[in-house]
Image: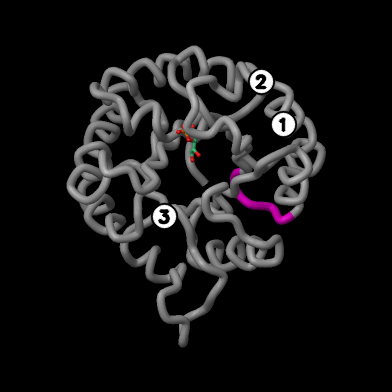
Amino acid sequence: MFDTPIIIVNVKTYSEATGRKAVELAKIMDKLAKETSASLAIAVQHADIQKVADSVDIPVLAQHIDPISPGSHTGWVLPEAVKEAGANGTLINHSEHRLKLADIDTCIKRAEENKLTTVVCSNNIETSKAIAALEPDFVAVEPPELIGGDISVTTANPEIVKGTVEEVRKISKNIGILCGAGVKNGKDVEKAIELGTDGVLLASGVVKAQDKEKVLRDLISGLK
Ligand code: G3P
């Protein structure tokens, strides 16, 4: 389980944070985490997990794992391999890589067996409830239509965040709750916390910024 409140940056497959650029961004985050004591984590492409994990102390997440055990599964992502590469956790069921509920369940169990913190994405309140019943470490609600946009979910659809917090809390007090989509600045982070979440999951606001450190500093200011 990661410290909260937390800011998780998912670099997706943006060229601005692929390969050595993923390491560069992770190093900026690592420096800021040490300087400010903010809880920061980065979700990188599988090919970059090892080099990022070897370069920083902040938690590193895979962006996906598959619901498989060691054996004959060519081209799939084995939780054990992600762990051995140095990941501390994994996203599961991101909007850009959706899974069936039964597979989400298996992924959570396989991640737990490998001591990987699970951040399971949902697209609405109903899905958040279904996922919470599977007891991941975190549920991250992200309305797909706001992903990659300029308006934060906390402004465009605070109801989905509040509703997720209310419904997940009815199921368990131990599950962390995150929100994401369009999160860009400290005010968005502050609002996310006000709405009852334990932090945010974001991508383009950091990855596509010219001055990533400046944006991260602003985001961190919202945690206070
Ligand atoms: O995983 C985070 C993501 O889907 C949100 O993307 O670009 O709207 O921050 P973005």
Between the C-alphas of marks 1 and 3, the distance is 25 Å
Q: Is residue 37 visible?
A: yes
Q: Is residue 142 visible?
A: no
Choose the circle earlier in sequence order: 1 or 3. Answer: 3
Asked if the residue under mark 2 is in contact with the one under mark 1, i.e. CB atoms within 8 Å, the reply is: yes
Question: Does ligand 1 reach within 8 Å of label 1's beta carbon?
Answer: no
The segment highlighted magenta reads 134-138
194, above or below 109, in the image: above
- For badge 1, the amino acid type reads Val
Residue depicted at 39% across the width and 27% down the height: 205
Q: Position of residue 82 (x, y in %)?
A: 39, 64
Q: Quadrant of residue 25?
A: top left
Between the C-alphas of marks 1 and 2, the distance is 8 Å
Q: Report if residue 224 lies within the magenta region.
A: no
Instruction: List the single residue furthest toward the bottom.
Output: 72
Q: Position of residue 112 (x, y in %)?
A: 56, 62
- What is the number of callouts on the image? 3
Which residue in the structure is indicated by mark 2?
195
209, above or below 155, in the image: below
Q: Position of residue 126 (x, y in %)?
A: 78, 43
Between the C-alphas of marks 3 and 2, the distance is 27 Å
Q: Position of residue 18 (x, y in %)?
A: 26, 48
- For badge 2, the amino acid type reads Leu
Which residue in the structure is indicated by mark 1?
165
89, above or below 171, in the image: below
Which residue in the structure is indicated by mark 3?
62
Q: Nearer the viewer, residue 120 or 1?
A: 120
